[in-house]
Amino acid sequence: MNMRSFLFYLLLLLPAVFQLQAQPLSGNRGEFSLADTLRGTLSPPRTWFDVAFYDLNIKVNPDEQFISGYNDIYFTVLSPNMVMQLDLYDNMQVDSILFDGQKLDYKRLHNAVFITFPRLLRIIDGIHLIRFYYSGKPVTAARPPWDGGFVWSKDKEGNPWIGVACQGDGASLWWPNKDHQTEEPDSMRISVAVPNSLKCIANGQNKGATPEGNYTRYHWLVTYPINNYTVSITIGNFTHFSDVYVSGTDTLNLNYYVLPYNLAKAKTHFEQVKPMMKCFEQYLGRFPFWRDGFALIETPYLGMEHQSGIAYGNNYRTGYNGQDYSGIGLDFDYIIIHEAGHEWWGNNLTTADIADMWVHEGFCTYSESLYVECLYGKETALKYINAKKPWIGNKAPIIGPYGVNREGDGDMYSKGAFILNTMRSIIDNDELWFSLIKGLQTEYQYSIVTQDTILQYFNRKTGKDFTAFFKQYLFYPHIPTLEYKLTKQKGDTYELSYRWQADVPDFAMPVKYKQNGKLNWLYPTTQWQTLVLKNLKNNELPIAEDLFYIKVKKADK
């Protein structure tokens, strides 16, 4: 395909791409560029094929901060086509792309690579393979893990210590792939050559090492589906120790890769993994990647939820690098608990679009409270959740704009946890609630979901309609306000008038108020209602704001 043909093809393609973007969601579409669309939209050059297996083979030169190698991409055809979009950041060099022994033509546009095959590929042809050779200096992370890229650092003894985290920015900043969250290969091999003085730790099972002159190549095999951004490598002078978590008659391998001078403290500090695993198994189900095992890998940045190989950089401290992240004085390592929670929320159950990232972060943050409830009880867990309230700004929606690789507001962590705590209070049946949380993991194991998947699941399982509830809390920045006024009748009897102030016109949600030591239900809508209350003290309506994430406003008479 020559440049003129490619540009003509692109002109045909773009209307379909922008039609996919035209959804009534948050955000100003004018903020987004063609590069955002190419990165975030499932356009025709991305949807006609399905990746079955990645076989990534690279060499890392720490002195030059340079990587080179190739990715073998095995894929099947879903509909006939001959133009494929893969992704690789434009600062990285495409050396060549091979198919059936011949080089393929390609064009680059921003961080997308459009590859032209010599013939139409058909569904009946089975599995195809292309080999994508590339090289270059990948993006260096400015503020990892919040800004994606490589971290080129040294440990206290002067040895290279290298990590990579790329959530949000995308795995294509360091290896070529179909960089969209809907695309998870069924399995993956990661083979990395590093200087002989170093080791490379990656995801999945350790399959040994082979010498390559002054380098050693380390082989890792992921035997489950894996999302691209959780594929990672960590390089350093590591020592290894292991343990097992016992579940019934089965055992889960626990592997720890740490710097040698931290070995003693790591052996003590990581003892909290087994009770954590027991709590998560109770509430979320069995660890999803059992064959590949669970690992913590010491990294030169704070942490990241890399599948079966969690990045750990909390310096063997409790809380958040020594700060009381719980807000109530609980003494556990936040990074271990939170990032391990993502093995269920994000790695096992993955959203189709990064706009729905609240499903990963909100459910994972809520799972921290389940861990607290498991070890310390329900009341302490409720205090833990409510301690996060000051962190929420409610300035923007926690759902992002679809199709442009853009997350919603950072409130998705704590606000997401409050949303779930509020749902638990509405359902008011803990046996059902815990079955719902665990059921999400089993029903959608190794699956791609959307926000609508989650909504319909709760509607179906509870027999309630949470549509307006989700719309208010996810697509609008403001939380609902319960407005009320009390009119004195006789003695301590009052007439209560109440309604919701909300962005969603048909918003209706029950809440509880406290009276005479008991919790009672109110059923407000956006229309004024009245209720006569007796024995009300102090002319106030004590709403259970620890159970429901709302504002309460006493209206003027």
Image (tube, rainbow, N blue to C red):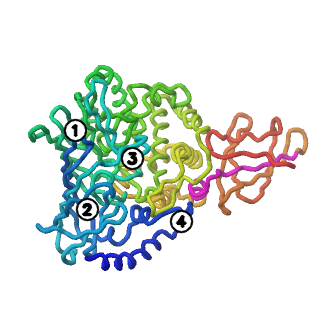
The residue that mark 1 highlights is 200
- Identify the amino acid type marked 1: Cys
Nearest the viewer among 341 and 97 is 97
Q: CA distance from mark 3 to mark 4?
A: 24 Å
Left or right, residue 11 beside residue 423: left
Local SS, label 4 = helix
Residue at (27, 38) in percent of width and height: 234
Label 3 crowding class (10 Å Cα cut-off): few <14, some 14-19, many 20+?
many
The image quadrant of residue 529 is bottom right
Left or right, residue 272 beside residue 526: left
Percent position of residue 453, x then y: 45, 60
Q: Is residue 152 above or below residue 115?
A: above
The residue that mark 4 highlights is 29
- Identify the amino acid type marked 3: Gly
Q: CA distance from mark 1 to mark 3?
A: 19 Å
Badge 2 or badge 4: first in the primary sequence: 4
Local SS, label 2 = strand
Q: CA distance from mark 2 to mark 4?
A: 30 Å
Badge 3 or badge 4: first in the primary sequence: 4
Label 4 crowding class (10 Å Cα cut-off): few <14, some 14-19, many 20+?
few
The image quadrant of residue 269 is top left
481 magenta-colored: yes
Percent position of residue 537, x then y: 81, 35
Q: Nearer the viewer, mark 1 or mark 3?
A: 3
The residue that mark 3 highlights is 148
Write the start and end of the magenta stretch as one range: 469-487
Residue at (38, 79) in percent of width and height: 12
Quadrant housing the N terminus: bottom left
Nearest the viewer among 145 and 68 is 68
Q: CA distance from mark 3 to mark 2?
A: 24 Å
Return the mark for residue 51: 2
Q: Is residue 71 visible?
A: yes
